[in-house]
Amino acid sequence: MTQPLFIFEMANNHMGDTAHGIAIIRAIREVCAGFPFQFAFKLQYRDLDTFIHPSFKGRDDVKYVKRFEETRLGHEQFAALLDAMRECGFRTVCTPFDEKSVDLIEAQGIEIIKIASCSLTDWPLLERIARTQKPIIASTAGALPEEVDQVVSFFTHRDKDLTLMHCVAEYPTPMAHLHIRRIDALRARYSGVRIGFSTHESPDETEPVLLALAKGATVFEKHVGLPTQKYALNAYSADPVQVRAWLLAAERALTLCGSETWPQATPAETASLTSLRRGVFLTRDLLAGTVLTDADVCFAFPPVAGQITANQWSKYNRCVATQPLTAGAPLLAEAIALQNTRDSVLATVIAVRQLLAEGNIVVPGKSNLEISHHYGMERFTEFGLTMITVVNREYCKKLLVMLPGQTHPEQYHEQKEETFVILHGELTLWLDGEQRVARRGDVVTVQRKTRHKFHAGRGVVFEEISSTHYASDSFYTDPAIAANPHRKTLLTHWL
């Protein structure tokens, strides 16, 4: 992207009125003339028939339910808005809040997907977005650095075109809460990832956009609307005159930069984000002691107090019912035992780094890390291996790391022949059941179809040099391993 991209967020400011939405687009187009920028318009999609839980439909005592239902547009009406955007030369962007909305984005040919801050760790939604071939922009309001790390790792591992937006989820945002220097922190932490600025301050304030530009942000987002006798604007959406002033913004106050640290979300920010998340609801009755799966739940808006949200439903969390659960009810935190394996993954990464450092072993930057937990992370200290793929072409080189006390179960390969060089520590191995010990500097060749098993007493790092590795060419003699579809965790952002 050679020119800064300015995104005009329509949200629900079309007021459920297609003609009014088109008028907004055309009015903003007029004030954009003559600027050396790229411009885009953004919509928000919610499949309201499934997004809002049936027990909340038609309720006017829940602010966002009332707002979303009152401004509902159909697919053809959204298509008319998209046609107007394209006719005016705008790129098209859309924020989906559920999986069906991603389907519609693809069907309508929208260029860019935007992830709202409240959905940043909505893992079921992110999995669906990752299956598209579209650039992704993600807002980070209220997120911890570790959460942003996880999202960056998730998308960069899948080679996605990713932009992160500094954002504060207070509407409007007080000037003292802008923390524009956080753009510096994002750029330093995520080299190679595009950084932007999504603003919610009073639309009369023009200094923040200039400060963000000065700090290297290249994508900017602002809510816009068109006040009429029928429709008024909210306190954080800009009218065409304010948009023009925003684009013309020159210099002002360095004091607006604020802190580049990652403060905890304010109570108002936390409440705002939580209220916009999807809750986890039961789709069938379950007995106490049941391990919940995707088939047992659905994700719908809005959440209720104490409810598990979609943001907590990931492959790293294991939910076990501690009491009987009823179909249609919200899944409450008090009714389950929630076991998180991400801490185990992090502990593994730290231990692998330490063992590599002890052996003075250099690892190429951005090498993918593959954690093999054959019987689950809960037994990784007994059975497992960590693998770093350096290259995999007609030839293959990997670094294999086994922590103290680990065993790698017996397997064999039909196509691959491999040679191991011990770089650090000591490895006990069995070749077709025959035991031997290999130490630093030893070379061991394993021919095709030879059954091999490893054990590391005090930890070991060894190099694998082989013919091409194929994922389908590893055959374990214990059928329980092949039957486990979740026996690997892949990481990119780990060094």
Image (cartoon, rainbow, N blue to C red):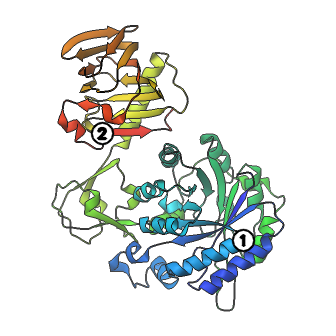
The crowd level at tag 2 (other Cα within 10 Å; few <14, some 14-19, many 20+) is some
Whole-number angstrom distance, CA of label 2 to CA of label 1: 50 Å
Give the structural element (helix, strand or loop) at label 1: loop
* Residue 178 seen from this side: no
Closer to viewer: mark 2 or mark 1: 2
Residues packed near mark 1 inside 10 Å, few (<14), some (14 to 19) or many (20 plus): many
Please count the marks in the image: 2
Q: Which residue is mark 1?
A: 203
- Kind of residue indicated by mark 2: Arg
Question: What is the secondary structure assignment of the residue under circle 2?
Answer: loop
Residue at point 68% right, 92% down?
A: 229
| Residue 243, placed above or below residue 156 | below
Lateral position of residue 166 relative to residue 402, left or right: right
Q: Percent position (x, y) of residue 479? A: 18, 36
Seen in the picture, residue 70 relative to 484 is either above or below; the reply is: below
Q: In which quarter of the view is residue 220 placed? A: bottom right
Q: Residue at x 49, y 62 (%)?
A: 118
Q: Are marks 2 and 1 in contact (CB under 8 Å)?
A: no
Give coordinates of residue 152: x percent, y percent. 52, 46
Q: Is residue 7 above or below residue 179?
A: below
Q: Is residue 383 visible?
A: yes
Report the residue marked by disc 2.
487
Please name the amino acid that badge 1 sits on: Pro
Q: Residue 456 appears in which quarter of the rendering?
A: top left
The residue lying toward the viewer, choosing from 191 and 482, is 482
**Does label 2 or label 1 sit earlier along the sequence?**
1
